[in-house]
Structure formats: structure tokens, C-alpha cells
Image: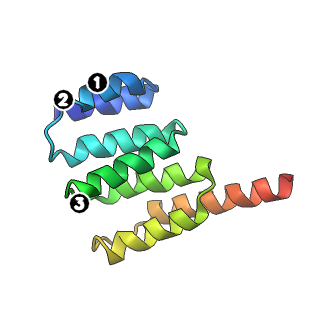
Amino acid sequence: MVRSALIDMYGKSGSMSDANVVFSNRTKDDVISWTAMIVGHAEHGHSKEAFKLFEEMCHVGLKPDHVTFIGVLTACSPAGEVELGLRYLNALNKSYGLEPEKEHYGCVVDLSKLVEYMRLRS
């Protein structure tokens, strides 16, 4: 629990290198630590890192939770990944049996607004 809180704190402050050090010493089945890393990267625009961690987390057999999906959906915005965001939203229920919540839909709406804004600017 303390390890996850440290990862979350470092992630919120943008110290992802420090978060990585703590994360590397985690227990393998700690979904909260994985999620804290994904969210930290997502909140600081490190979309590729967030996506990679999500895939690794699933590959080692851990089941993402609602907060994990908020992280990967958030990561879709700076990357402009509308299709990927919609796939994650679909996987939330179809692959993991979780019901989307308003926060998940909010992330997709934000992503759509950002893409539309970028389209109008070009």
C-alpha cells in the first residue's frame, strides 16, 4: 500500500523516474501500483508509456480495474488516439466485464473534443 502511494505521489508530481524506481520493486500482482504508473504517465502526456504498461499488465495476467481504464483513456487524448480510445472503452465491458462509468465516457468526450479542435485548427 505504501509503495502504491509513493508511486501515485511521484506520478502526480511528474517525477516519473522516481515512480519507476519504486515500481520496479513492487510485488508482481499489485494492480494498484500498475494503475498508478499508467495514470501518472497519462497525466503527463506520456501516452506510449501508459499504453505499454497497460499491455504489460494484461500480459502478466492482471485484470485492470475502472481506474486503470481511466488512465489509458486519458492517455489517448494527447496521442490523438480516438480509435484506440473507443477500443479501450469497448474492452472495458466485453473483455473485462466492467461497466463503463461516467468518467470513462468523459474521457472519450474529451478525446473527441480535442481531435475536433485540432482538425479545426489545421
Instruction: Check disc 2 and report the residue beneath it.
Output: 25
Q: Quadrant of the N terminus?
A: top left
The answer to whether residue 50 is above or below residue 109 is above
Say whether disc 1 or disc 3 marks the residue closer to the N-terminus. 1
What SS does tag 3 mark?
loop
Q: Are marks 1 and 3 in contact (CB under 8 Å)?
A: no
Residue at left offset 84%, top offset 58%: 120
- What amino acid is at disc 2? Asn
- The three-letter amino acid code for the residue at tag 1 is Val
Against 9, residue 28 (above or below) is below
Q: Residue at x 33, y 27 (%)?
A: 19
- In the rendered structure, find residue 63 and report the number of the disc placed on it: 3
User: Is residue 40 shown left or right of residue 5?
Assistant: right
Q: Residue at x 75, y 61 (%)?
A: 116
Q: Position of residue 38 (x, y in %)?
A: 38, 44
The residues bearing labels 1 and 3 have C-alpha atoms spaced at a distance of 23 Å
* Residue closest to the eye, 101 or 37: 37
The spot of residue 47 in percent (x, y) is 51, 45
Query: Which quadrant holds residue 88?
Result: bottom left
Q: Which residue is mark 1?
A: 21
